[in-house]
Structure formats: structure tokens, C-alpha cells
Image: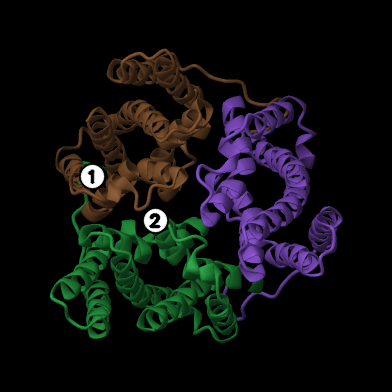
Chain colours: A brown, B green, C purple
């Protein structure tokens, strides 16, 4: 139950991030819906391929298609002012990252993989959809360009793995993990934390 | 038999679309053959990963490599006039889309997944190879840019699923499904059907 | 043992190629490490997905993450002069290609797939990580642009498959196969072998 709710919420938020990015790239309504669905389902499908779940759960029930498709349409009609699009993509991406990292790590743990492997699969689940979105729009993925993107994802995954190790209740732990990811990404965006670039490379 | 014939025909046509796009991008003869093979086999390999078929059938027999490699070489030597290349890529892509959507849906149904899942896997099979081709050449995939690309694929998949539900013979149904996809794509290209772009986004 | 050693060596070299390319694209330190890890593990993860190994071995033990992450950091701090970066990426890519093609082919053979399939999986293992690196940095992959890239990979895979068929010891055969790939790529780079481009396409 919790897993499905987290998954669907993450799907809606990632669908919004994909649809907003597609609106920004001036794709038509079909392109907006297709990119929303792809961004939303990409991470979960990669997770299921890594865990050997065939066919991936995202392809097995209606809500997994309806939620992102409807989100894409809503974004297309009611998207916020143009000036705010870039910020909206980043915010939706941060929330989706948090939800997908924790649901991905939790799913992996229920399939009895070691905690270390579960964390890496959770990070991949969180990063996958957004990376797919950026590659399809010919942008360098956020995970390569943004401050502490992968580190924030890893922190969320470790919280979930620790929670399970300490036998804490899975629901609150997943929420705390997600919130931590969003907080870290939000801080990095707000403070414009910049990581160093290698010396000696000319612009 | 029918599945293999449909598959090989789709592979040849998609190989031609990949090779033509590579010629247009001025790749050398090896690049043309590699992109033709990748475009041709990509969709089927994604389909087999989603269905849990290991190793993918495209990697298990000679014709699946020889047909697209030979097609790539033929396209390299006898490619049509430059002015027609863009149109030729689009046409080969439409035929390949139709054949792969119906063969993908049929393969999924023979693996006893529900009709809904089979349609989604069929659409992914059809879209996958062309999306890979466009991403490798740094273009935004057709499925995001073109009128009713995904809708045409979905229509073809639904025809196959309906045909199986009504216990109609698989062969003619697959041909009708493929023809429907090609007809929808052809109409959209011919009439320049344009879907709306979101309001308020400046060019 | 041999497989793991070859794998880790290939991972370090491919991580260096990814990190060098990321430094060249002016990514920050996190981007450099993430791209190094992705380039290094991408090929092996694709190989395990094709063979149905769940979860992929690259996600199951510490060294598979530590080696490429540490390599990425080392490259970030001690990367060679800017002018030599392009050449360094190409060289690291050639060595990684050789090691991954032979370890991929050997792994596939130990999973009892036919020699033909093992060669194709080996080639995909070798090509996969570098293609991922180039796509994430929005470049057309080396395998499509460079002289005899895919042919060199195929030659290395065939050496390994032949060696197993002749019951030769796996270790030396893998080294010879890797050396052959590096030699072919090196020759092509040194001599600027150019394959023909299709006639009639204007620049």
C-alpha cells in the first residue's frame, strides 16, 4: 500500500517535471504527454529490470499510465507562467527524486537484496526517469550538472536502509528519507552551492 | 513463422531508416551499418528485456544480424538523392513502426501477459529502435515531435489485442494493424496535422 | 578471479575515460565522479541485463563502486594538460573497450550461451559504457564516428570465442584479445584511417 502510494505520487510529480520540460522545449500536446509518461515510468522500469521483475509493474495496471498521462495534460493546459518554468521543473524533479529514491530502495529491500545493493538500485530508480527526460530533450542530465544531486539521492537511500536495519516502521522512514532528499536539493538550489570545477580547463 | 517474418521485415525497414539517417548525418560506412543494426535490433531487445527473455532473441540467430547489416550496406551504396533523404527516413520509420508494434504486441501476448500490458510492450517495441536512433544522432526523437506518432502505435497494438480477444487469425490481424499504423502516420505527414503547442511559451 | 581482475581493470580505465570527458565538458567534481561511475559500470550492467543476471554484479560489491569513484576523483585532481585531454579520452576508451569486450564475451560463455551470442554480448558490453558516456554529454558516440571501432570490438570477441573452442587457457587468450582491440584502435587513430562517406551528401 505505502509503496504503491509513494510510487504513484512520485510518478505524478516526475510526470509534471517531464511535461513542464516538454512545454519549455515547445513540444506539442502529444509530445508533452509522452515525455511526461516516459519521465514518470522510466525510473521504475529500470528498477524492475535490475531486480528481474518481468514485466515491470509500471506496465501492469491502469493507474500507472493514467496518472502520468492526466498529469501531462493538466500541465499542458494549466502550465505556470513561462518565466517560472525552469524553477518548476527543478522543484518537481527534486520531489520526484525523493519519492522515487525511497520507494526504489524499499522495493529493492523487499526483494531481499543486500542493503548496499538496495541503496544503489534506489539511487538509480530516482535518477533514471529524469536522466531519460533530459537525454530525450538533448540536455546534459541534471545529475551531472547540479550540486549534490547524486549525493542527495544517496542520503535518502541510506536513511531507508538504516531504518529497515533498525526495524523502524517503513512508512515514516520513507517520508523522512524523501524529505531529506528534497531539503538537500532545495538548499543546494537556494544557496547556489557550487562544487569546484577542475583547474586548467579553459571555458 | 509469422512472427519471425514480421520481425525480419520490420528489422530490414528500421535498419534502412537508421542507415538513411546516418548517411544524412555524414557518418562513414561503419557508422551507417552500426546505426542501422542498432535501430533495427533496439526495439526487439527492449521488448525481450521487459518480458524477461534472456538472452534476447535478436542476439541468438544469424539473420537478425545479417539482414540489418546488409540493409545498411545497400543503403550506403544506393541511397536515394539527398533531397529525398528526410522523407525516406520518415517513410521507413512509419513502416518499421507498424511492423514492430504488431510483432511486439503479438510476442507479448504469446508470453501470457494481460492484453493491456501487451499493448504497452508492443508500443515500446515499436518506439524503442527509432528513439535510440534519434538519441544517438542527437535529435529529439520523432515520437516527441511528430503528429500522432504514439497514438498511431497504440492504435496498431489495440487492433492486435482485439483480434486475439475475438480469436481472429493472427496473421491477417497483424497485417491490418501494421497497415493502420502506416496509414495514420502517412495521413499525418501528408496533411501536416499539427497538434497544439502550449500557450504563452515564446519561441 | 581472472574475470574479476579484468572487469575491475576495465572499470578503472573506462571510469578514467568518462571522468576525462566530463572534465573536458567542464562538469563539477560530482558530475565528474558520476559520469566516471556510469561509464565504468554501464557496459557490465547492460551485459547482466542481457544475460538475465539479477541484480547486476556491478551493484553487488563495494569495489565495483569504489574503484570508479576513486578513479574519477584522481582524474579530477590530477588530470593531464588540457591540450592532451581529447587524446587521453580516446586512449582510455580503447583500453577499456578491449578489456570489456573480452570480459563480456568470457562472462557470456560461462553462462552457456552459444559462441555467436557471446560475441555479440561481449561487443555490446564493450560499446555500452562509452556510448552512454557520449550520449550523456550530448556527443555522437565514438562507435558511430570512429574508424573500425565496432570491427575492433568484434575481432576481440572472436579471439575469445575461438580460444574457448580450441580449449586454450582463458587468461592468456583474454589478454591477447584485449591487446588486439587496443592495437586495432591505436593503429586506426595513429594512421587516421578513414572509412568512406556516402557519395552525394553535401556537407
Residue A72: x and y in percent read 21, 44
Figure quadrant of the N terminus of chain A: top left
Q: Residues within 10 Å of mark 1 (few under 14, many from 20)?
A: many
Question: Does B195 appear above or below B93?
Answer: above
- Does residue C147 appear in the picture of this structure? no
* Marks 2 & 1 on one chain: no
Residue C141: x and y in percent read 60, 55
Q: Is residue B1 left or right of residue B30?
A: left
Residue C56: x and y in percent read 55, 43
Residue B31: x and y in percent read 62, 68
- Does residue B68 appear in the picture of this structure? yes
Residue bearing the label numbered 2: B50
- Which residue is painted at 43% across and 13% down in the image? A191
* Pointers 2 and 1 in contact (C-beta within 8 Å): no
Figure quadrant of the C terminus of chain A: top right
Q: Chain of mark 1?
A: A
Whole-angstrom CA distance, mark 2 to mark 1, is 16 Å
Q: Is residue A68 left or right of residue C125?
A: left
2 or 1: mark nearer the eye:
2
Q: Is residue C195 left or right of residue A87?
A: right
Residue bearing the label numbered 1: A64
Name the residue nearer the viewer: B192 or B130: B130
Q: Chain of mark 2?
A: B
- Which residue is painted at 27% across and 84% down in the image? B171
Label 2 SS: helix
- Which residue is painted at 53% across and 45% down in the image? C136
Q: Write down the quadrant of residue A92 in the picture.
A: top left
- Which residue is painted at 26% across and 57% down in the image? B117
Amino acid at each position: 500500500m505505502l509503496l504503491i502510494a509513494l510510487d504513484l505520487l512520485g510518478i505524478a510529480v516526475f510526470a509534471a517535471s517531464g511535461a513542464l520540460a516538454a512545454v519549455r522545449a515547445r513540444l506539442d500536446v502529444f509530445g508533452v504527454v509522452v515525455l511526461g509518461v516516459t519521465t514518470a515510468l522510466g525510473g521504475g522500469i529500470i528498477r524492475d529490470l535490475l531486480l528481474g521483475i518481468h514485466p515491470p509493474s509500471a506496465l501492469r495496471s491502469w493507474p500507472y499510465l493514467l496518472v502520468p498521462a492526466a498529469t501531462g495534460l493538466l500541465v499542458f493546459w494549466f502550465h505556470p507562467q513561462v518565466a517560472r518554468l525552469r524553477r518548476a521543473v527543478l522543484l518537481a524533479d527534486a520531489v520526484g527524486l525523493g519519492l522515487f529514491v525511497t520507494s526504489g530502495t524499499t522495493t529493492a529491500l523487499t526483494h531481499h537484496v543486500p542493503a548496499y545493493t538496495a541503496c544503489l538500485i534506489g539511487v538509480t530508480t530516482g535518477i533514471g526517469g529524469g536522466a531519460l527526460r533530459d537525454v530525450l530533450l538533448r540536455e546534459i542530465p541534471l545529475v551531472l550538472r547540479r550540486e549534490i544531486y547524486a549525493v542527495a539521492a544517496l542520503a535518502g537511500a541510506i536513511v531507508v536502509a538504516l531504518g529497515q536495519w533498525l526495524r523502524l516502521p517503513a512508512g515514516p522512514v520513507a517520508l523522512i528519507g524523501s524529505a531529506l532528499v528534497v531539503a538537500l536539493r532545495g538548499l543546494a538550489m537556494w544557496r547556489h552551492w557550487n562544487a569546484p570545477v577542475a583547474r586548467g580547463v579553459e571555458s
